[in-house]
Image: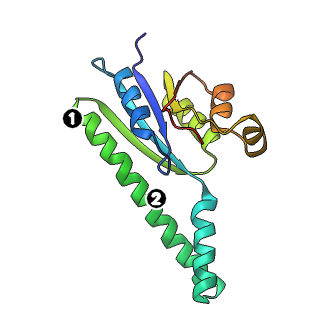
Amino acid sequence: MHFRKVLVAVDPAGEGQTQIFERALSLAAEKGGRLMIFGCLKPSTAAELDDRVGTMDGLDSSSSLSARDRFQGTVLDRSRAWLESLALTARQQDREVEVVVEVGKAGPEICQAAAHWKADVIVLGLTRRGKFADRLLGSVTHHVVHHAPCSVLMVHSGKTA
């Protein structure tokens, strides 16, 4: 099967992401194949850490908010840099690559990006938290499989959580 537009969703904070990226790259290997490397950060990640920093430093709420915004910017910059390093690998293999980093709920963000970009397939990793944890916490994989506007390829990286 030939996919011209492959969206690979990687977790900038996760393990086993290189294998997921390599699988997506191989799908877009034919001439003219395009790749979108998509990362999504939870908004609470940066906010929770900054609130702790602000509390520990004794900052007022305005200073704490400013520190949180700076920290979130740093997290986004680091994530984007990592995704750009993956993009460089793809570009060295003559692939057309786009890098997107969003902050929000990963499942809906991935589906929205795939629909907007008109992706042929979404490639993402399969997590193994267990049925109870997935029901309680929600599952990016479950959301994408049930709401994706295109085909979905799940890559098992061999890691379990």
Can you give x and y, in whole percent of width and height, for residue 97 in the image? 34, 35
Tag 2 or tag 1, which sits nearer the N-term? 2
The label shown at residue 92 is: 1
Against 12, residue 73 (above or below) is below
Residue identified by numbered label 2: 76
Say which residue appears at 57% left-offset and 32% top-offset.
126
Residue 136 numbered mark, or none: none
Q: Residue at x 63, y 68 (%)?
A: 48
Seen as rendered, the residue at the extreme top is 1
Mark 1 is on which residue type? Gln
Crowding at mark 1 (Cα within 10 Å: few <14, some 14-19, many 20+)? few
Q: Judge from the rendering whether residue 32 lies leftward or rightward of residue 74; answer left or right.
A: left
> Decide: marks 1, 2 in contact (CB < 8 A)?
no
Of helix, strand and loop, which one carries label 2? helix
Quarter-wise, where is residue 147 in the image? Answer: top right
Q: CA distance from mark 1 to mark 2?
A: 24 Å
Name the residue nearer the viewer: 35 or 14.
14
Q: Position of residue 35 (x, y in %)?
A: 38, 31
Residue at 64%, 26% (x, y): give it. Answer: 145
Residue type, mark 2 in image: Leu
Q: Residues within 10 Å of mark 2 (few under 14, many from 20)?
A: many
- Name the quadrant containing residue 18: top left
The quarter holding residue 89 reads top left
Q: Position of residue 113 (x, y in %)?
A: 54, 37
Secondary structure under the numbered disc 1 in the rendered image: helix
